[in-house]
Structures are given as C-alpha cells and as structure tokens.
Amino acid sequence: MNRLFTIVCMVGWFMVSHVDATYAEPYRPTDDTQVLQQLSFKASDPVARELDSLRTNLRGNPRNLESAVKLATRYIEQGRSEGDPRFLGQAQAILSPWWNEPTPPPAALLLRATIRQNAHEFDQALADLDLVLAVEPNNAQAWLTKASILQVQARYDEARRACQRLTRLTASHVLLGCLSDIAGVTGQSVKSRELLRQVLSNTILSGLERIWIATILAETAARTGAIREAEESFAEAFKVGIKDQYLLGAYGDFLLDQRRYQDVMSLLRSETRADGLLLRLALAEQALKLPMFQNHTAELAARFAAGRDRGTTVHVREEARFTLTLQHDAHRALPLAQANWNVQREPADAKILLESALAAKNPPAAQPVLDWMTSNHVEDFHLQQLAKQIQEAPF
Amino acid sequence: MRILLVIVSLVFALPAWAHKPSDSYLSLSVQNNHIEGQWDIALRDLADAIGLDSNGNGQLTWGEVRNKHDEIRAYALSRLALSADQQACTTQLLEQLIDHHTDGTYSVLRFRSDCDAPIERLAVDYQLLFDIDAQHKGLLRLTQGGQTSTAIFSRELTTQEFSITERSRWTESMQFIHEGTWHIWLGFDHVLFLLVLLLPSVLIRVEGHWKAADDFASVCWNVVSIVTAFTMAHSLTLSLATLDIIQLPSRFVESTIAASVVLAGLGNLYPTMMTRRWMVAFGFGLIHGFGFAAVLTDLGLPHDSLLLSLVSFNIGVEIGQLAIVAAFLPLAYLIRRSWSYPRLVLTGGSLAVIAIALIWFTERAFDLQLFPI
C-alpha cells in the first residue's frame, strides 16, 4: 500500500508539473539599481568612441559615401566579432541612400553583398559582386567575397578561379588561404595543410588573418583525423587573443567530436548569447547529464520560435542540429537539414543531413550529400564514417 | 595593410549569430471606438535610438530606464500612428513596465488610443527604428472580438490597414460557448471532481460492500441528480460573481476547489461518510462556480452584452460536462461487474486523484510552486 501510494504521488506530481504552466508577466522593478540589460560597450570603450566619431561625421553629411562606407564596415566587423546581427541592420540603414539605387557605387555594392551574404541571400550577393567586378575587375575584396560564397555553395571550380584572380592583387597569404580552404575539403588536404603551415610560420600576419589561417588549418586537420595538429592550430588561433565567434564554434565542435565535454563546458560556459554556441554548450550538458541542459534546450526552442515569428530563416543549420541532437526528433530535423543543404553546402551542413537521414531511416535523403562527397573527393573522416553507415544500413 | 585587414575580417566564414535581429512586439486590441495596446521594445534598441546608459558603464539599470520614461514615451509615440477611417486616434501612454524576451530585456509600454467613432478600418503606420536599423521588424498581434491576427511591419512595409468586422452577437456567443467547453476540459480540477463523484454511480452499496447496479435507469438517475446539482450550484455562483454581487479571494476559491477534490476522493474510499452524493455536488459546486467566474473575467467581458456572454459561457460549461458524462457513463456501465472496477478504477482512481489534488491544495493554499517549470 505504501508503495502504491508513492507511485500514485509520483504520477500526481508528474501531471501537476505539466498542467501548472506559469507565464511571465510584464512587471515594474522595485530596485533602481537592478541591472536590466548589458550593452555592447561602455561609453569609454575605444570602439564606442570610434563609432561615435564616425556617426558624428556622417550626421553632418549623410550622403557622403566615404564616411558611410567607413561606418558601415565598422558595424559589420563589430557584428561579426560579437555575433550580433543588429549591427548588420544598422550598417544597412547607413547605406540606405544608395541601397535601392539601380546602380549603387561599387563601395556600397560590396557592402550590400556582404550584408546579403550574412542573410544567406547568396545569389543576390553574387549578383552584386559581379556588378562590382564589371566596373572594377581588380577589386580584391570582391573576388575574395565571391570565392567564399561560391565555396559555401559547393561551386568549387568557380571558387578556385575567383581565388586565382587574387594573384598580384593582394598579399600571397590571402591567396593561399583562399585556395587552401577549398583544397582542404576537395581531396587535397595534405597539400593544403602544408601550405597553411608555411603561411603561419613564415609570414607576418595581422591578428585576424592569423585566426583565419589557423582556423582553416585546424579544421582541415581535424577532418582528416590529425587530432594533434588540429589542437595545436586551434591553440595558435586562440593565442591571438581576439574573440571570434566562428573560432569558438569550430573548437567547440572539435571538442564535442572528441567527447571532451568538460572542456566544452569551460570553453562555452558563459557564451549563452549566440544560438550556435549555446547549442554546443547544451550538447555537452546533455552528455554530462547536467540539469542546466533542460533550461538551455527550452531557451533554444524559444529562440528558434522567435526567429520563425519574424519570418526569416538564417538559422536553419543550427535548428536542424538542435532538432536532431537535443530534441531527438529526426523526422522534423530531416526536412530542415534538406532545406539547409539547398542553401549552403559545407562539411557541417553535410554532416547534419547525413545524421538526420540516418536517424530518420531515410537513406535516399542522404543521396545528394553522398554525390557531393564522391564528385568532389571530399576528405572528411566523420562524413566518410556516416556515409558508410548509411550505405551499410539494412533499411 | 589596412585594406588587407578589412578583406579578411569581412570574408572569413560566417559566425554563429546571437539570436535574431531587432524586433518589437506590438499588440492592439480593438474595442468598439478605442484600442488597448501594448508595445514591447528592446532596451538595446532604445539605447541605440535615444541613449539610455546615463552613466556610460555599459549596463542599463531600472533607475536609468525610469529616468528616461518621458523620452521613451515621446520617442515611441512619435513612431506609431493609429487612425480609424482616415481620422487619427489620440494615444495616451498608461504605464511603462519591463519584460524579458529571448533576446534580452524589453521596455513594455501600455497605452490606450481613442478614436472618434466605432472603428471600421484601422490603419497602422509603424516607423520605429527603421532609420537606424534597416532589418528591424514590428510584429503585430491584432485582437478584435476574440479573434487574433498577426502582421509584420518592415522597412518595405510600414503602413497596413485592417478591416474591423462588426462584432456579431452570434460569433461572440459561440466564442464564449467554446471558451466554456474548453475551460471545463482544460480545468483539470473540475473534471476530476466530477469524475470522482461519478465513479461509484454504477455501483450500489450492499451490507458494506460494493455491488454492481442492476439496471441502467437507476444509474442514469443517480448521474443526472449529481450533474444537475453541480450545474445548478456553479451556475448560481458564477452569475453572482460575474455580476459583482459576491466576491471571494481567488486563493481561497482555488484552494477550496482543490480540497473539494480531495474530499470527494476520500468519500469514495470511506463510502459511509457520504451517502447523498448530489448534496456534495451541490455544496462544492457553489465553490467551483467562483472558479469559473475568474476565467470569465480574465477573458474580458464585453460590457454591452454581459448577460449573453454569461449565459453562453455557462452553456459551454454544460456541453463540456455532458461530453465527459457521455464518455464516462457507458464505459463504466459496461465494466461495472468486472473484478477490477471497484478495486482498480474506484479505489485506485480515487487514490490517484487524491494525490494530485493534495498537491494542488498545498500549492494553492500556501502559495508554493512545488514543481518549478
């Protein structure tokens, strides 16, 4: 009877805990010193001062292209380093005198392409870049941006040609970084790693360039199973001391693949603002069975829902991964992963589609990725394992 | 060197963005000739637009926000124009609160807009932030006569018009019937109370033991008496409370409802305690009526058709109740003779309900959250 009562109570608790949902209501704080919101910078931060002076400049003459481009560029850089898309909207607002012109000046077009690239409007971004290059065929920035978009779309031959146009337009390490990134995915990782190592040891690089090259090297090494070299290259990128959202995400994934969950915790514990980083943190918490896992999963679900409410879909890769790995819903994850694959085709996109197809027991859905792997001789140890599982699976 | 730096930093693979770009959440509820509104605007956006960080330390405190309430009001109201049938409505800010959304803390502005005549076409001109953030969006929820529609404002679409359909008595009363039905279905405490009282209705007590009832007619009579008593009681108090004739504190009402479920369950375990179940149903039905009234008040009663909505809501509650009886009675009647009915269904079911209701009671009476979500 006692045991029965215990069971009854547990059933009761379970039901109550699911029925008694509480909703937060707007409230009036009682304490003037309560901190409500952290801002991007203090008034005294050098970045804030720089942005302030650029803004003041522009306010005097809002149609001055040079000051507008300067400020918009700073905003985009700031958005990138903080992972905050608000800065992109602000950059776009600054460019608004030129944004809807039939033929904006090349400098404005170039930034429009970058903003569209960040919104995953790749074809429109490429069209903008072609307009720039028609007027300024030697614009290195445009060629490099074009190469990186083509690479995301898995149009490797065109991307390689765009990189090659950088010869003599820019320093050799930019050209090498551009080419090696493609080579590392498409079957030439040995050569790619060798070149990148040389760049890192011989060349004087700016901090951001060093992070860029070292991260490419680390990811290429990790894909081919050279764990030690990957670890060293990540360490080299972190040594620069500039916070970079992409680097944190890439290293987080590397650690997750190694099942080094405690290291993920120490790397990302305070990175709860960026969805992609919170996702990796929650994955580590799930593996370690930490209670925070529940809260972080709920938080992520709310954020994806809020993103859908505004009608934009930039986070499909993350949402597919979230749905598959944290919500364990392969049947909802698969269409997301497929939709994402239609837009971007990097190894991470291939991985989530293979994993979803496998979990949903739907091998035909993986076919586009398998084709992509064969035709480009993709070198990636995890992808090859997954492909093998799919081909051998008795569905 | 400067050029190279720009090159790499702009191109390097896309970062993991922190949530979404800037949004504001605007709710408008149209009532005849005025609009009740709530507008949630991110503090970060307000800080960019009008500057809130007075001491420049990179943190916004409630004190800083409160000191800027006048500026926030002036800024926000200058960016939103509501007009009804070409006539501008006058907007008045009622209060400024704080709320949290997935991407940070928001300032909540509650306002009221008065228009000259009953609103037929509502035009919303939304101009918040577009000048400084081209990707900003305004997410509108428009409520009219219980129906909600949504719309999105963007830099490309700053003005939208909505036709406000004449509120029909029929739709309105259908809506209250619907709410009543759903409330009894979703309000677990009412369902459980009723079910617990009905559980023994297919049995009769003979010499201290449960025995299956012989004919359907007597079972039906039993059920009808219980349901009718419950209905009469809660309709009475629901009306009294809605018409503001009697008011009881909600904590007392909610705790007593939970207690009524516990007692009804105990009555099944100790049948001698309760011989006339219809009286129990009537007595506690009075309290359940106050619980229904709270829901009805939350729905926002139209003042010009108070009685209609009250009656409709009550009809809805009855429909929900009848559905429960219709589902329960044939099933219970069929299995009443089985070995498991008195033991598993009656005793086990009553025990489970008691456990749930005890937890409700503790939570409600002592204002605890035993199971934080």
Image: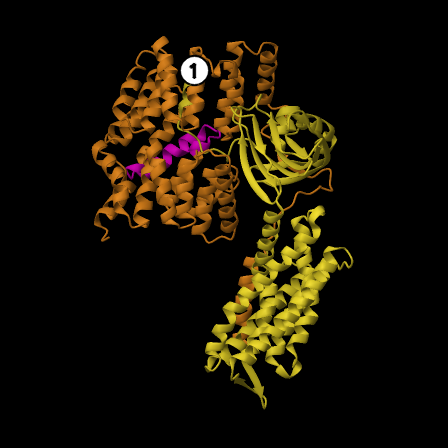
Farthest bottom residue?
Answer: B207
Q: Quadrant of the image for the N terminus of chain B?
A: top left
Task: Please give the letter of the chain rendered in yellow.
Answer: B
Residue A325 versus residue A301: which sits nearer the camera? A301
Q: Specify whether residue A232 is painted magenta.
A: yes
Q: Read off the residue under disc 1.
A: A109
Q: Specify whether residue B66 is painted magenta.
A: no
Chain hosting mark 1:
A
Q: Residue at x 50, y 25 (%)?
A: A88
Residue B22 spot, x, y in % from top left: 55, 31
- Is residue A64 visible in the rendered image? The answer is yes
Residue B214 versus residue A370 in the image, above or below: below
Tell me the colour chain A is drawn in. Answer: orange
Q: Residue at x 40, y 50 (%)?
A: A328
Residue B236 versus residue A193 in the image, above or below: below
| Horizontal side of residue B194 vs B93, given as left or right | left
Residue A56 spot, x, y in % from top left: 61, 14
Residue B56 versus residue A15 in the image, above or below: above
Magenta: main secondary structure: helix
Q: Residue at x 36, y 48 (%)?
A: A331
Q: Which residues are magenta?
A: A222-247
Q: Residues within 10 Å of mark 1 (few under 14, many from 20)?
A: many
Q: How is the image coloured?
A: by chain
| Horizontal side of residue A321 vs A63, given as left or right | left
Residue A96 versus residue B291: which sits nearer the camera? B291
Residue B243 spot, x, y in % from top left: 75, 55
Residue B107: image quadrant is: top right
**Amino acid found under the numbered disc labelled 1:** Leu
How many discs appear?
A: 1
Residue B141 versus residue A103: which sits nearer the camera? B141
